[in-house]
Structure formats: C-alpha cells, structure tokens
Amino acid sequence: MSSNTLEKIITKKTEKIEKLKKTISSESLNDLIKANNTFVDFKEKIEENIKNNKFSIIAEIKKASPSAGIIIKNYDPVEIASTYNKNKATCLSVLTEEDFFYGNLVHISKIKQKIKLPILCKDFFIDKFQVSLAKSYGADAILIILAGVSDKVANELYEEALRLNMSIIVEVHTVEEARRALKFKDCLIGINNRNLKTLKTEINTTYDIHDVLVAHPGPLISESGIKTKDELLEISNKTSIKTFLIGESLLKDLDNNSIFSVLKG
C-alpha cells in the first residue's frame, strides 16, 4: 500500500460514506443496535488474559490485501471464524473494506450468528457515522489508524465508540504516532509492524515503539509480520506484550498452525 494507495483508499471511503449517510439515518442505525444482543466486550477479554498471564491472539479474517493480493480464493469468512474458534482464538478481526480488501460489513453479522467471539471491525474509519454503522452489524470494536486521520477526527471516532460502549484499537507505526496515541487512555494500542506507505514489514517496529507506550494503561498489541510461534515468543520475551493480531500467517495454514499452541498453555 503505497502512500498514494492509502490516499486512494481514504478518498474512496469518503465518497462511499457520504453516499451512505444520505440513505441510512442515525435513527435506523440506533434501532438496529438496540435490537442486537450479540455484543461481547473485546477489551475486557484481552485484559482478563493479561491478568492471568495468558497470551491473546486476535485472528484476522480477510480475502485479500494490497500487499498480498488474493489470499484465499474460495473465501468463506464464517468457516474461517469457526476454525479460529476451534483453535481458541481470543478475538476476531474482520476486514470490511470493500474495494481493496474485498471485505463487507455483512461478514461480521454472519459470523456473529454462529460464533460468540468479540469482533474488531477492521476498516479505515474516517467518520463517526462508520462507528454506529459497524456496531449495527454486530462489531464490538473499531480501529483508528492514526496514519490516516487527524487528531480531531481520531478524537471524534474515539468518543463515539466510547458512547456506544465499543472497544477501540488505536493503531500506530511511528514514534510520533505513538506519542499521539498516549492521550487515548481507554483503548488498546496496536503497533503495526507494516509501514502503510511502503508495505514493508519490520518486526523491530514493535521494539522501537514499545518503550514510548509502556506507560499506557491499556493493552498493547503487536500487529503484522508475525510468521511463527518463535517470533511471537521472542517479541513477548523482549517486551511486555502478550497480545498479537495475526492474519496472513494464520490464513495460509489454518488447520495446523503452531502459533495457536501458545493459547493452550
């Protein structure tokens, strides 16, 4: 995802949201939210594991990405979620961006009908309308990517999610973004090892940023580029991090992935 691609994603997302806001009222979203009884506390589940010195894996569900292309041709998000659930995944991350990741919000509601794990709506949030929209489909948490929004927009998204009793992952990739994230006290902070401008993945990003975030009261997450159980354990041994968001490495070996074994100790 080059810088230009990131801009394209946000531009496309802005256009779609403006159209949706003309056809979906806030009242109808509120009615859908009130009628939904599938919500699970995403942050609380991870915090409970941390208290008990256990690992958490946020297992990602996606068909494709700008960096990898098509990952799974015969994509069945419910089937993938079921496999993750059998392997004791802590939470799920579901890509819902349509044009670059081939996701859809309906995937969240379909998964929630079958599986009771907390779900992060993984998307490019740029408007607080999206927060209510995500919750109306059953999402328990949202993602705020600081590389893609101003502090003003980030704060609007954060406050709206808190109002709706949703968990929040504030995602950072640089020391500057990490410092910006510190003001969001009631959230999880995800350190993305992937540079969203160059698409390069560097595990050292977690180490470089960890010290800036260590005083944050919420759980820290290492995201992207974790390919093996040994890499996960090395990161955990060198930092205080016990929570990991993993996608492609799990998706490419769903049935026999050794990474899940850290959850069975």
Image: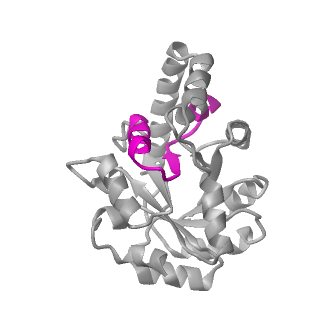
Q: Left or right: 3 with respect to 207?
A: left
129 is higher (above) or lower (below) than 232? above
**Which residue is drawn at the image coordinates 45% and 64% (left, top)?**
89
Stretch of the chain drawn in magenta: 105-131
211 in the magenta segment: no
**In the rendered image, the vertical position of residue 112 relative to residue 204, given as above or below:** above
Residue appearing at x 70%, y 54% in the figure: 187
User: Where is 76 relative to 242, above or below?
Assistant: above
Residue at the top extreme of this rendering: 22
Q: Position of residue 108 (x, y in %)?
A: 43, 41
**How many marks can you see?**
0
Residue plotted at (38% across, 53% down): 61
Question: Which image quarter: residue 192?
Answer: bottom right
Q: Is residue 18 above or below residue 85?
A: above
Q: Mark yes or no: residue 225 visible.
A: yes
For residue 128: magenta? yes
Q: Which colouring convention does the figure follow?
A: one colour
Looking at the image, can residue 174 be seen?
A: no
x 58%, y 45%: residue: 148
Give the image quarter of residue 49: bottom right
Question: Farthest residue in the left direction?
Answer: 74
Task: Point out residue 124 in the picture as x, y percentages from the top left corner.
Answer: 52, 41
Could you say where residue 7 lies in the image, as x and y percent from the top left? 49, 40
Toward the viewer: 24 or 213? 24
State left or right for residue 257 relative to residue 58.
Answer: left
Could you tell me residue 90's position as x and y percent? 50, 62
Answer with the quarter of the image where residue 248 lies: bottom left
